[in-house]
Image (tube, rainbow, N blue to C red):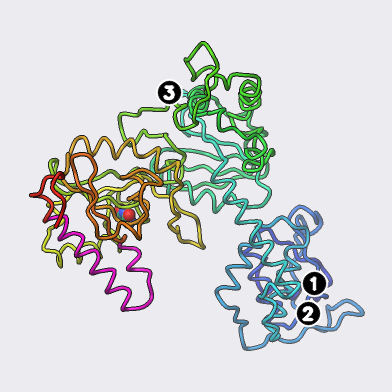
Amino acid sequence: MSAAAASAKVAAGRPLVVSSFQEWRSAARDLLMHEVAPERVTWNEVGTHAADLFSGAPDPAPSADNAPAGLTPLQPALPKRPSIPRALMDMLQSAACCRMPDRWAFLYRVIWRWQHGEHDVQSPADADGARLHAMVKAVRREEHDMHAYIRFRERPLEAGPPQFAAWFEPRHDVLPQVAEHFKDRMGNVTWMIGTPDASVMWDGATLHHTGPLMKSAADLDDAGEALWLTYYRSIFNPARVNAQLMQSHIPSRFWKNLPEGAIVPQMVSNAELGARSTGQAQAVGRKSGATIPIAPADAQPERQQPSKLDECRRCELWQFATQAVGGEGPKKAQIMLVGEQPGDQEDLAGKAFIGPAGQLLDRVFNAAGLERREIYLTNAVKHFKWEPRGKRRLHKTPAQREVEACHYWLDKELAAVKPKVIVALGATALKSVLGSGSAKLGESLGKAIRLGDRWVVTVYHPSYILRVPDEATKQAAFKVMVDGLKLAQSLLNRPPEEPPA
Ligand code: URA
């Protein structure tokens, strides 16, 4: 539908049929310019108005002559184009993905009100504003759920591309934006996602959007499923199972399309019936004999021992990160610096401390008379944990279980590099190095703590300095970092038996 056609159709008493946000936007702009009030417009989704879809009748120009009886002729186009702020337009675009029968009419009412000076329409305190916010939230949630619960299955090579396929039944129209997400995350492999209404295929270079190509998950080729189920069984820990919590985290509508959905009820009931006596499900626990109480953290005899960081599945963070980011520096560095986790830029580049926190660190090194190339730089957690905020990925503090799972890798680095001094940047690094509950950041700052045959010095994390607003606090924290690194250097020639001066 052309933009000019919208006001003409309304003048002719015909409904407007739209199939996308872009179509709605150009129609809405035309209607606003002609001052067409929301009550005068009937909006239909594609497919709900067959006559309009298939009629080849040209759109009449708006005029007093062709306006049906009883309808006021439309105003001539106003010279001024409506101007809707970017933030509101973004919300409208997001809300347009929410499957509500009256979505187009509602969105038009919102911009009509805005255009007529009712700027409260954007506020959650306004009834329409509240609905708009709720629609945006529902869509974001669905995007999140689709990122989290979609499962790509590898297809047999002989089946040809795509290499991976997934099925999902989204509640809202989020397939296009979710496809963009996986396009950026999955690199060159070819994949497709099927849903009941549409499909999308990535051929390694271009996204192809088509109508529905599959009817259900049963149409997927299941080559990768056996592997996935084996993995899921091995990480399943009945000692930690709380079926209710699990269901509240993964709503039941997703279970049927998750490969592990079929085996979870059985594993839960095994756990409840006594497999717990071994501390793990049958496939995992190997202990026999009397029932022994076992701490969940120790009940991991077969917790995955990957040989390569890229293959690590010891916690769930790998699923959302672009890649694992390992440590870097001289093989026998005397000082090892441990941060929290890679940030957005580190995740994309695969290198630790190259973003803003790393740049600040360079200034600290400089002030402390150190060079980056002398130091081994790593993180307590090797995958970027984040949450979406608009188009940005915002850092999220890793959970204790993720820090513990990743300690496996820090141990390997410590064993290989054998640094004399570890510098922990911030609370997460400190917990990882010394173990949770052993030391608090405030008490440890700037001090040397003995850990076996090495020293641990704790300083602020550079992000803290980037975050605090006032200059005096920034400078004080910078000084703590510089002094901490100077202390680290002074400890190099002092065996841990000898307390620091
Ligand atoms: N923050 C960290 O702790 N590590 C990085 O690599 C980057 C930012």
Specify start and end residues of the magenta stretch as a single range: 462-489
Q: Quadrant of ligand 1?
A: bottom left
The answer to the question of whether label 1 and label 2 lie on touching residues, with beta carbons closer than 8 A, is: yes
Residue 197 placement (x, y as % from top left): 67, 44
Q: Residue 484 lies in magenta, yes or no?
A: yes
Q: In the image, is 225 to the left or to the right of 342?
A: right
Residue type, mark 1 in image: Val
Quadrant in which the N terminus is drawn: bottom right
Residue type, mark 2 in image: Ala
Vertical placement of residue 415 versus 53, above or below: above
Residue 423 placement (x, y as % from top left): 23, 52
Q: CA distance from mark 1 to mark 2?
A: 7 Å
The residue that label 3 is drawn on is 301
The answer to the question of whether label 3 and label 1 lie on touching residues, with beta carbons closer than 8 A, is: no
Q: In the image, is 304 to the left or to the right of 471?
A: right
Instruction: Mark 2: give few (<14), some (14-19) or many (20+) Cα within 10 Å.
Output: few
| Callout 1 secondary element | loop
Q: Nearer the viewer, residue 119 or 3?
A: 119
The residue that label 1 is drawn on is 41
Q: Earlier in the sequence, mark 3 or mark 1?
A: 1
The residue that label 2 is drawn on is 37
Residue 386 placement (x, y as % from top left): 45, 53
- Look at 21% across and 35% down and name the residue there: 415
Using the rendered view, name the quadrant where residue 381 is placed.
top left
Instruction: Mark 1: give few (<14), some (14-19) or many (20+) Cα within 10 Å.
Output: many
